Amino acid sequence: MMTTKTYSKTTCLILCGIFAAITAICSFVTIPLGFTPVPVNLGTLAVFLAGGLLGPKYGPLSQLVYILVGAVGVPVFAGFRGGFGVLMGPTGGYIIGYIAATLIIGLLLDRLWDERRNLMLCALSMALGLIVCYALGTAWFIISTGSNVEAALVSCILPFIPGDIIKIIVATILTRRLKPTLSF
């Protein structure tokens, strides 16, 4: 187990704000796909980092801040969009899934972090967080669009897997490098 530092509540809240901003910046980088309203973006990279570095308490809080800022209309979501309507639209479940993903990642790494096997554990934690995000997002996509499960999988998961694997690799490397310095 790694030793943890004690940060003031102010520092923790500032870090939550910083990671909410990082999520917004990463969400601005989008590639729209013609066959689905769900764009490719870097938002999940920020989610992986928030869960891995801020842990199960502050990681989800950072994503809640991101979502609330977007819900009130600040254009922080993919495609420079904001407002409650985005959360009610076809991508809303994925955005809400950011909270669950950071919680899963944070819980697993908080309980199981081991310097000797941290790369594999970190990547697996992020993959499990992603699966939860995919599940929530795809369920909401089906409800909001009336699509069937097969169509939702083809348009909302399969095209994103290669990019998400790359994001997990990058986030794992960054988490491994930064976690010893920034641990709760």
Image (spheres, rainbow, N blue to C red):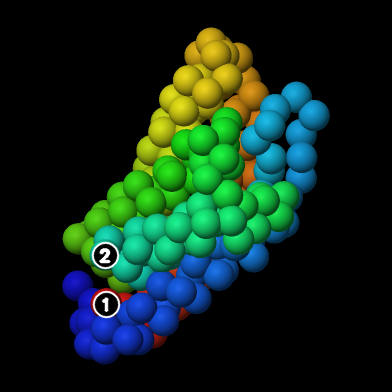
| Whether residue 49 can be seen here | no
Looking at the figure, which quarter contains the N terminus? bottom left
Q: Which residue sits at x=76%, y=40%?
A: 32
Rendered view: 184 above or below 172: below
Q: Which image quadrant for residue 62?
A: bottom left
Q: Residue at x 55, y 62 (%)?
A: 23
Residue displayed at 35% across by 86% down: 11
Task: Name the residue tied to disc 2.
Answer: 57
| Residue 102 can be seen in this image | yes
Amino acid type, residue under disc 2 in the picture:
Lys
Give the foreground label among 1 and 2. 2
Q: Position of residue 123 (x, y in %)?
A: 43, 53
Up/down of 154 relative to 49, above or below: above
Quadrant occupied by the C terminus: bottom left
Residue 124 picture location, percent across and down: 38, 48
Secondary structure type for disc 2:
helix
Residue type, mark 1 in image = Phe
**Lower position in the chain sequence, tag 1 or tag 2:** 2
Neighbour class for label 1 at 10 Å: few (<14), some, many (≥20)?
some
Residue 136 marker = none
Name the image quarter holding residue 59. bottom left
In percent of the image, x 52 and y 23: which residue is there?
Answer: 144
- Residue 25 against residue 77 in the figure, above or below: below
- Say if mark 1 contacts mark 2, CB within 8 Å: yes
The label on residue 184 is 1
